[in-house]
Image (cartoon, rainbow, N blue to C red):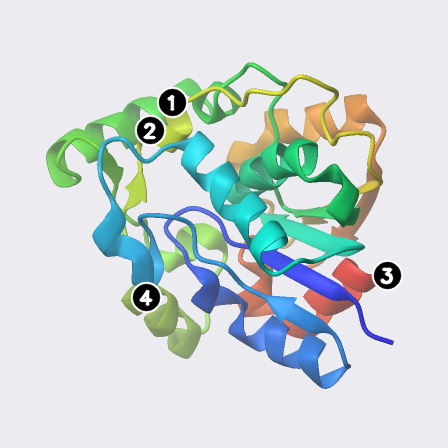
Amino acid sequence: MGEQIVLVHGLCHGGWCWRPVARLLREAGHEVFTPTLTGLGERAHLLTPEVGLTTMIRDVTAVLEAEELSDVLLVGHSFGALPVLGAAERARDRIRRLVLLDGLVIEAGRRAFDALPEDVVLQRELDAKRRGHGHALPPPPAEAFGVTDPDDVAWVERRMTPHPLRSYREPLALDGPLGAGLPVTYVHCTQPVYPVLASSRQVVKDQGWEWRDLPTGHDAMVTDPEGTVAALLG
Protein backbone atom coordinates (compact mmCIF):
# COMPACT_ATOMS: atom_id res chain seq x y z
CA MET A 1 0.00 0.00 0.00
CA GLY A 2 1.35 3.43 -0.96
CA GLU A 3 2.25 6.29 1.33
CA GLN A 4 0.71 9.72 1.69
CA ILE A 5 3.44 12.14 0.61
CA VAL A 6 3.45 15.94 0.76
CA LEU A 7 6.14 17.72 -1.26
CA VAL A 8 6.93 21.36 -0.40
CA HIS A 9 8.92 23.49 -2.83
CA GLY A 10 11.62 26.10 -2.21
CA LEU A 11 12.65 29.63 -3.18
CA CYS A 12 10.78 31.13 -6.17
CA HIS A 13 9.34 27.72 -7.12
CA GLY A 14 5.83 26.29 -6.80
CA GLY A 15 4.11 22.94 -6.65
CA TRP A 16 4.79 22.69 -10.40
CA CYS A 17 8.48 21.82 -9.82
CA TRP A 18 7.56 18.41 -8.39
CA ARG A 19 5.74 17.26 -11.54
CA PRO A 20 8.33 14.65 -12.66
CA VAL A 21 8.79 13.30 -9.12
CA ALA A 22 5.06 13.30 -8.35
CA ARG A 23 4.36 11.34 -11.53
CA LEU A 24 6.87 8.65 -10.59
CA LEU A 25 5.53 8.43 -7.03
CA ARG A 26 1.91 8.15 -8.22
CA GLU A 27 2.87 5.46 -10.72
CA ALA A 28 4.33 3.55 -7.77
CA GLY A 29 1.00 3.77 -5.93
CA HIS A 30 1.61 6.69 -3.57
CA GLU A 31 -0.87 9.50 -2.86
CA VAL A 32 0.98 12.75 -3.55
CA PHE A 33 0.23 16.38 -2.70
CA THR A 34 2.30 19.28 -4.07
CA PRO A 35 1.00 22.48 -2.44
CA THR A 36 2.19 25.89 -3.58
CA LEU A 37 3.10 28.33 -0.80
CA THR A 38 1.26 31.65 -0.60
CA GLY A 39 2.57 34.28 -3.01
CA LEU A 40 4.31 31.86 -5.37
CA GLY A 41 3.54 29.89 -8.53
CA GLU A 42 -0.16 29.93 -9.38
CA ARG A 43 -0.69 31.82 -6.09
CA ALA A 44 1.65 34.67 -7.07
CA HIS A 45 -1.32 37.05 -7.07
CA LEU A 46 -1.45 36.64 -3.26
CA LEU A 47 2.03 38.09 -2.75
CA THR A 48 1.98 41.02 -0.29
CA PRO A 49 4.55 42.44 2.16
CA GLU A 50 2.73 40.55 4.95
CA VAL A 51 3.36 37.06 3.52
CA GLY A 52 6.04 35.45 5.67
CA LEU A 53 7.25 32.19 7.14
CA THR A 54 4.29 31.96 9.51
CA THR A 55 1.95 32.16 6.50
CA MET A 56 3.81 29.33 4.81
CA ILE A 57 3.80 27.13 7.90
CA ARG A 58 0.03 27.57 7.96
CA ASP A 59 -0.10 26.61 4.27
CA VAL A 60 1.58 23.27 4.94
CA THR A 61 -0.34 22.58 8.13
CA ALA A 62 -3.61 23.37 6.35
CA VAL A 63 -2.92 20.77 3.66
CA LEU A 64 -2.32 18.09 6.28
CA GLU A 65 -5.49 19.00 8.14
CA ALA A 66 -7.85 19.79 5.25
CA GLU A 67 -6.93 16.59 3.40
CA GLU A 68 -7.18 14.65 6.70
CA LEU A 69 -3.77 13.09 6.10
CA SER A 70 -2.03 10.74 8.50
CA ASP A 71 1.26 8.83 8.67
CA VAL A 72 2.62 11.34 6.15
CA LEU A 73 6.05 11.53 4.56
CA LEU A 74 6.57 15.32 4.60
CA VAL A 75 9.28 16.64 2.29
CA GLY A 76 10.75 20.15 2.13
CA HIS A 77 13.16 21.28 -0.58
CA SER A 78 15.60 24.16 -0.05
CA PHE A 79 13.72 27.03 1.67
CA GLY A 80 10.71 24.69 1.90
CA ALA A 81 12.47 22.88 4.75
CA LEU A 82 11.48 25.75 7.07
CA PRO A 83 7.69 25.58 6.54
CA VAL A 84 7.99 21.81 6.89
CA LEU A 85 9.85 22.09 10.21
CA GLY A 86 7.27 24.57 11.44
CA ALA A 87 4.36 22.40 10.36
CA ALA A 88 5.94 19.35 12.00
CA GLU A 89 5.45 20.90 15.42
CA ARG A 90 1.88 21.96 14.70
CA ALA A 91 0.70 18.71 13.11
CA ARG A 92 3.11 16.18 14.56
CA ASP A 93 0.48 13.47 14.99
CA ARG A 94 -0.19 13.47 11.25
CA ILE A 95 3.45 12.95 10.22
CA ARG A 96 5.53 9.77 10.13
CA ARG A 97 8.83 11.12 8.81
CA LEU A 98 10.46 14.30 7.48
CA VAL A 99 12.83 14.54 4.54
CA LEU A 100 14.73 17.77 3.90
CA LEU A 101 15.95 17.78 0.29
CA ASP A 102 19.04 20.01 0.23
CA GLY A 103 17.12 22.04 2.78
CA LEU A 104 17.81 25.38 4.40
CA VAL A 105 17.89 24.59 8.13
CA ILE A 106 18.16 26.97 11.09
CA GLU A 107 17.82 26.65 14.83
CA ALA A 108 14.53 27.75 16.41
CA GLY A 109 14.28 31.51 16.82
CA ARG A 110 16.65 32.25 13.94
CA ARG A 111 15.81 33.62 10.48
CA ALA A 112 16.47 32.13 7.05
CA PHE A 113 18.80 35.06 6.35
CA ASP A 114 20.85 34.03 9.42
CA ALA A 115 21.80 30.83 7.59
CA LEU A 116 23.14 32.55 4.48
CA PRO A 117 26.52 34.20 3.87
CA GLU A 118 26.45 37.94 4.52
CA ASP A 119 27.22 38.84 0.91
CA VAL A 120 24.30 36.69 -0.29
CA VAL A 121 21.92 38.40 2.17
CA LEU A 122 23.06 41.86 1.08
CA GLN A 123 22.62 40.98 -2.58
CA ARG A 124 19.14 39.54 -2.03
CA GLU A 125 18.05 42.58 -0.02
CA LEU A 126 19.39 44.83 -2.78
CA ASP A 127 17.65 42.80 -5.48
CA ALA A 128 14.38 43.00 -3.57
CA LYS A 129 14.71 46.78 -3.32
CA ARG A 130 15.62 47.28 -6.97
CA ARG A 131 13.51 44.63 -8.68
CA GLY A 132 11.04 43.26 -6.14
CA HIS A 133 9.13 46.36 -5.02
CA GLY A 134 10.90 46.10 -1.67
CA HIS A 135 9.06 42.97 -0.55
CA ALA A 136 10.01 40.17 -2.96
CA LEU A 137 13.16 38.34 -4.02
CA PRO A 138 13.39 38.14 -7.82
CA PRO A 139 14.14 34.68 -9.25
CA PRO A 140 17.78 33.83 -9.93
CA PRO A 141 18.87 32.01 -13.10
CA ALA A 142 18.04 28.31 -13.11
CA GLU A 143 21.75 27.54 -13.33
CA ALA A 144 22.06 28.84 -9.76
CA PHE A 145 20.10 25.76 -8.71
CA GLY A 146 22.27 23.34 -10.67
CA VAL A 147 19.90 23.11 -13.65
CA THR A 148 21.88 22.90 -16.90
CA ASP A 149 19.79 21.02 -19.46
CA PRO A 150 18.45 23.69 -21.88
CA ASP A 151 14.89 22.36 -21.82
CA ASP A 152 14.90 22.19 -18.02
CA VAL A 153 16.41 25.69 -17.77
CA ALA A 154 13.68 27.07 -20.01
CA TRP A 155 10.94 25.32 -18.02
CA VAL A 156 12.20 26.41 -14.61
CA GLU A 157 12.88 30.01 -15.62
CA ARG A 158 9.47 30.24 -17.28
CA ARG A 159 7.72 29.12 -14.11
CA MET A 160 9.68 30.78 -11.29
CA THR A 161 8.08 33.77 -9.54
CA PRO A 162 9.33 36.36 -6.99
CA HIS A 163 9.62 35.06 -3.42
CA PRO A 164 8.19 36.86 -0.36
CA LEU A 165 11.07 38.68 1.35
CA ARG A 166 9.44 38.55 4.77
CA SER A 167 9.76 34.76 4.80
CA TYR A 168 13.55 35.19 5.01
CA ARG A 169 13.35 37.88 7.71
CA GLU A 170 10.85 36.19 10.02
CA PRO A 171 12.18 33.84 12.77
CA LEU A 172 11.27 30.17 12.86
CA ALA A 173 9.08 30.09 15.97
CA LEU A 174 9.10 26.70 17.70
CA ASP A 175 8.20 25.67 21.24
CA GLY A 176 9.83 22.24 21.06
CA PRO A 177 12.88 20.68 19.44
CA LEU A 178 13.78 21.12 15.78
CA GLY A 179 12.07 18.30 13.90
CA ALA A 180 9.47 17.83 16.67
CA GLY A 181 11.10 14.57 17.72
CA LEU A 182 10.21 12.92 14.40
CA PRO A 183 12.62 10.88 12.27
CA VAL A 184 14.40 13.32 9.92
CA THR A 185 16.46 12.52 6.84
CA TYR A 186 18.62 15.14 5.15
CA VAL A 187 19.41 14.62 1.46
CA HIS A 188 22.57 16.47 0.43
CA CYS A 189 22.84 17.26 -3.28
CA THR A 190 26.50 16.98 -4.24
CA GLN A 191 26.94 17.64 -7.98
CA PRO A 192 27.36 20.54 -7.71
CA VAL A 193 27.12 21.43 -4.02
CA TYR A 194 24.86 24.43 -3.37
CA PRO A 195 27.33 26.62 -1.45
CA VAL A 196 24.93 28.85 0.49
CA LEU A 197 23.73 25.88 2.59
CA ALA A 198 27.02 25.31 4.44
CA SER A 199 25.68 26.47 7.83
CA SER A 200 22.47 24.49 7.31
CA ARG A 201 24.46 21.30 6.87
CA GLN A 202 26.25 21.98 10.13
CA VAL A 203 22.92 22.31 11.96
CA VAL A 204 21.86 18.96 10.47
CA LYS A 205 25.06 17.30 11.67
CA ASP A 206 24.62 18.82 15.12
CA GLN A 207 21.10 17.37 15.24
CA GLY A 208 22.40 13.92 14.36
CA TRP A 209 19.79 13.38 11.66
CA GLU A 210 20.13 10.71 9.01
CA TRP A 211 22.25 11.92 6.07
CA ARG A 212 22.11 10.82 2.45
CA ASP A 213 24.11 12.08 -0.53
CA LEU A 214 22.45 12.51 -3.92
CA PRO A 215 24.84 13.11 -6.86
CA THR A 216 22.91 15.83 -8.66
CA GLY A 217 22.27 19.57 -8.46
CA HIS A 218 20.24 21.56 -5.94
CA ASP A 219 17.01 21.32 -7.96
CA ALA A 220 17.19 17.54 -7.74
CA MET A 221 13.49 17.07 -8.49
CA VAL A 222 14.19 18.59 -11.91
CA THR A 223 17.68 17.29 -12.67
CA ASP A 224 17.27 13.72 -11.33
CA PRO A 225 13.65 12.75 -10.60
CA GLU A 226 14.44 9.03 -10.33
CA GLY A 227 17.30 9.59 -7.92
CA THR A 228 15.16 11.98 -5.90
CA VAL A 229 12.37 9.42 -5.56
CA ALA A 230 14.87 6.80 -4.39
CA ALA A 231 16.35 9.23 -1.84
CA LEU A 232 12.93 10.19 -0.47
CA LEU A 233 11.69 6.63 -0.08
CA GLY A 234 14.91 4.85 0.81
Who's the residue at 40% across and 78% down the image?
Answer: 151
Q: Which callout, 3 or 1, points at the residue further toward the start of the chain?
A: 1
* Alpha carbons under labels 2 and 3: distance apart: 34 Å
Q: Circle 1 — which element?
A: helix
Residue 120, compared with residue 224, is above or below; it is above
* Alpha carbons under labels 3 and 1: distance apart: 34 Å
Do labels 2 and 1 touch, CB within 8 Å? yes
Q: Which callout, 4 or 2, points at the residue further toward the start of the chain?
A: 4
Who's the residue at 61% across and 51% down the image?
Answer: 65
Residue 27: x and y, percent? Answer: 71, 85
Who's the residue at 57% across and 76% down the image?
Answer: 20
Q: Which callout, 2 or 3, points at the residue further toward the start of the chain?
A: 2
Who's the residue at 38% across and 22% down the image?
Answer: 169
Q: Is residue 234 left or right of residue 142?
A: right
Do labels 4 and 2 touch, CB within 8 Å? no
- Amino acid beneath label 2: Arg
Q: Is residue 138 left or right of residue 55?
A: left
Mark 2 or 3, which is nearer the eye? 2
* Alpha carbons under labels 4 and 2: distance apart: 21 Å
Q: Which residue is mark 2?
A: 166
Q: Which residue is mark 1?
A: 169
Q: Which callout, 1 or 4, points at the residue further toward the start of the chain?
A: 4
Residue 97: x and y, percent? Answer: 80, 48
* Mark carried by residue 234: 3
Q: Which residue is mark 4?
A: 159
* Alpha carbons under labels 1 and 4: distance apart: 24 Å
* Mark carried by residue 19: none
Q: Which callout, 3 or 4, points at the residue further toward the start of the chain?
A: 4
User: Quadrant of the rendered structure where residue 100 is?
Assistant: top right
